[in-house]
């Protein structure tokens, strides 16, 4: 299916829209070009609505900036194009067709050209698209223009009363199937009968021979081409030309489609206009076309963004799972270091309190010694001795405190350094997790 998606832009440029777009083309002095529709004009400027695939925008341009201005001719009847390019359900969807038809109703053209180049696709999407087209055909004249239409795309084309084909076009092979891991497979018999009934109803809405749609999906069927008062007539038995044998699935070339009274051939959009409306026509605008293509493009971009988000989430979860053991180990070590620091702070506080208590006792002993010195032979000498003893004891207590506190503080500083290094390691681990 990938070849269809890759070829879409080329198809859009070269197949159906080979005729010049009826758009205002403004070329500025700097060479920049705008294609779209002039919505207003005054003496100094013009305002142009530029048609984009995913969105449109309005630009007001001073006339002094304009180098050239090609104005479209509006001879004949207006039409718009709605593309059915690529795989149904992937490259064109019910939502996309709905958006295109909404823009077609705004443009109010005489004709809507359903340009089809598709290998088919999802049955459910086909049914939804046919329902939209049947409803739209109450107010819009829809014409199918086929380059290739197989399976679901063929049914969509056959739901239109008027079908035109490029000279090298093909249409047919509407056998319902479902996709499996091993490729296409037959559908359940009950489901198949429902699908075939919907296909026949679509064909009936288009007013085409019932044997055509049956021949494109039923193997056990023979079809003969006969003549009824100069008009082609299809029968399940002769006389006539055998155009489908049992065991075959019907697919028509453009010439065969003409021979069987199903379609007409139109090599170009100009020739198509001559046959459809009997004279010239012009493309009213590109909004319906762009809305159809743009809806799919926007949906696909959102799907891709959602897929990238899911992939990113999975990558994040995998990365987190990978670093979690090391992260938890670091957290455990940091918790140990913090607990050790708290314990060391408590030890320092206890040592300081004990040192202060010791110094208080030393002061009390000194004060008592001073009192007792009065009863000594040499009071002054006794006081001096008591002071020396007190100072010595206090100095020893402070040294003991400083020695123990210094070791604990050194351990605390080492712990802070280790914690800082561990936090840096965590930052490195966190940086390895994929981000937006």
Image (tube, rainbow, N blue to C red):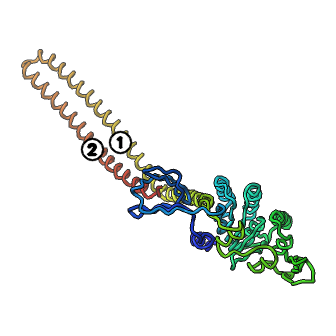
Where residue 46 appears, as percent x and y from the top left, is 47, 53
Quarter of the figure with residue 255: bottom right
What residue do we see at 37% from left, 39% from top? 342
Label placed on residue 405:
none
Residue at 6% across, 19% down:
378
136 displayed left or right of 220:
left
Instruction: Check the picture and name the quadrant holding the N terminus.
Output: bottom right
- Judge left or right: residue 145 versus residue 10: right
Q: Earlier in the sequence, mark 2 or mark 1?
A: 1
Residue 51 in the image: x percent, y percent? 54, 58
Which x, y percent locates residue 270?
Answer: 64, 71
Which picture quadrant has residue 359? Answer: top left
Circle 1 — which element? helix
Mark 1 burial class by Cα count in 10 Å: few <14, some 14-19, many 20+: some
Judge left or right: residue 57 versus residue 422: right
Query: Circle 2 sits in a helix, a strand or a loop, which is it?
Result: helix
Can the viewer see residue 32 in this picture? no
- Which residue, given by chain and number where applicable, does mark 1 sit on? 341
What is the CA distance from the residue labelled 2 to the residue labelled 1? 12 Å
Q: Which residue is mark 2?
A: 407
């Amino acid at each position: 299916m990938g070849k269809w998606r890759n070829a879409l832009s080329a198809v859009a440029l070269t197949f159906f829209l080979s005729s010049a777009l009826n758009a205002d083309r403004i070329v500025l002095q700097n060479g920049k070009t705008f294609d779209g529709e002039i919505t207003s004009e005054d003496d100094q400027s013009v305002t142009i609505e530029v048609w984009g695939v995913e969105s449109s925008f309005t630009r007001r341009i001073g006339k002094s900036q304009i180098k050239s201005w090609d104005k479209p001719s509006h001879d004949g009847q207006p039409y718009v194009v709605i593309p059915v390019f690529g795989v149904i359900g992937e490259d064109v969807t019910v939502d996309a067709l709905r958006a295109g038809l909404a823009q077609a109703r705004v443009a109010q053209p005489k004709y809507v050209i359903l340009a089809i180049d598709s290998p088919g696709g999802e049955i459910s999407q086909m049914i939804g698209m046919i329902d939209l087209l049947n409803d739209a055909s109450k107010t819009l004249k829809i014409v199918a223009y086929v380059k290739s239409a197989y399976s679901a795309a063929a049914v969509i084309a056959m739901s239109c009363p008027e079908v035109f084909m490029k000279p090298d076009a093909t249409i047919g092979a509407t056998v319902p199937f479902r996709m499996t891991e091993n490729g296409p497979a037959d559908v359940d018999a009950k489901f198949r009968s429902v699908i075939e009934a919907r296909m026949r109803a679509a064909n009936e809405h288009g007013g085409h021979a019932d044997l055509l749609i049956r021949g494109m999906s039923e193997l056990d069927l023979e079809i003969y081409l006969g003549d009824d008062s100069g008009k082609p007539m299809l029968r399940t038995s002769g006389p006539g030309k055998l155009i489908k044998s049992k065991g075959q699935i019907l697919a028509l070339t453009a010439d065969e489609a003409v021979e069987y009274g199903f379609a007409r051939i139109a090599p170009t959009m100009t020739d198509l206009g001559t046959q459809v409306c009997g004279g010239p026509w012009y493309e009213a605008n590109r909004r319906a076309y762009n809305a159809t293509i743009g809806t799919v493009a926007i949906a696909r971009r959102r799907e891709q963004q959602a897929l990238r988000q899911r992939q990113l989430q999975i990558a994040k979860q995998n990365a987190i799972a990978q670093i979690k053991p090391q992260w938890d180990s670091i957290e455990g070590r940091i918790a140990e270091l913090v607990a050790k620091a708290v314990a060391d702070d408590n030890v320092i506080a206890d040592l300081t309190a004990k040192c202060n208590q010791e110094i208080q006792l030393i002061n009390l002993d000194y004060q008592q010694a001073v009192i007792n010195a009065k009863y000594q032979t040499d009071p002054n000498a006794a006081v001096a001795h008591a002071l020396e003893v007190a100072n010595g004891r206090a100095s020893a207590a402070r040294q003991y405190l400083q020695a123990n506190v210094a070791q604990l503080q050194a351990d605390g500083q080492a712990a802070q350094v280790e914690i800082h290094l561990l936090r840096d390691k965590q930052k490195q681990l966190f940086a390895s997790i994929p981000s937006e």
